[in-house]
Image (spheres, rainbow, N blue to C red):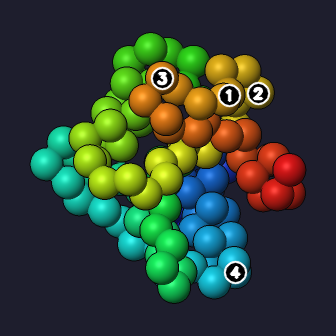
Amino acid sequence: MTRFSADNTGFQLKNVVHNELVRRGHSAEVGTFRAGKVDFVARRADETVYIQVCETMVDPATREHELGPLRSITDAFPKRVITLDRYGLGTTSDGIKVLSAIDWLLRR
């Protein structure tokens, strides 16, 4: 039995983001921190980016679940959330960029 199903859009999106990170030359590993797990710690040469991936962040609890682990990381590397949402995008007050998956994939 495969975990890849039409009902698991979040898993599929994480898979697409992982493959794109690797295609762009990054290593992509899961990051575990005191405050939780980050979907990807993407590294390439001297560049590191922390990335959370989620289908939607419309629900405030989901938004906090995705942003919380990124907020706990105290270094200065960029932090991103990639989502299928078209609203609520931009930069949070603590500098985390919330990006549309479509725009990120198309490098817009």
Report the label total: 4
Residues 75 and 34: in front is: 75
Estimate the x, y position of residue 9 in percent, counting from the top left.
62, 45
Residue furthest to the top in view is 60
Q: Which residue is mark 4?
A: 23
- Is there CB contact under 8 Å for labels 1 and 2? yes
Which of marks 3 and 2 precedes in the sequence?
2
Of badges 3 and 4, the one in the foreground is 3
Q: CA distance from mark 1 to mark 3?
A: 12 Å
User: Is 5 on the left or on the right of 45, as rendered?
Assistant: right
Estimate the x, y position of residue 15 in percent, counting from the top left.
59, 64
- Is there CB contact under 8 Å for labels 4 and 2? no
Question: Which numbered disc covers residue 93?
Answer: 3
Question: Which numbered disc covers residue 89?
Answer: 1
Of badges 1 and 2, the one in the foreground is 1
Q: Residue at x 60, y 36 (%)?
A: 98
Q: Which residue is mark 2?
A: 86
User: Is 66 on the left or on the right of 56, as rendered?
Assistant: left
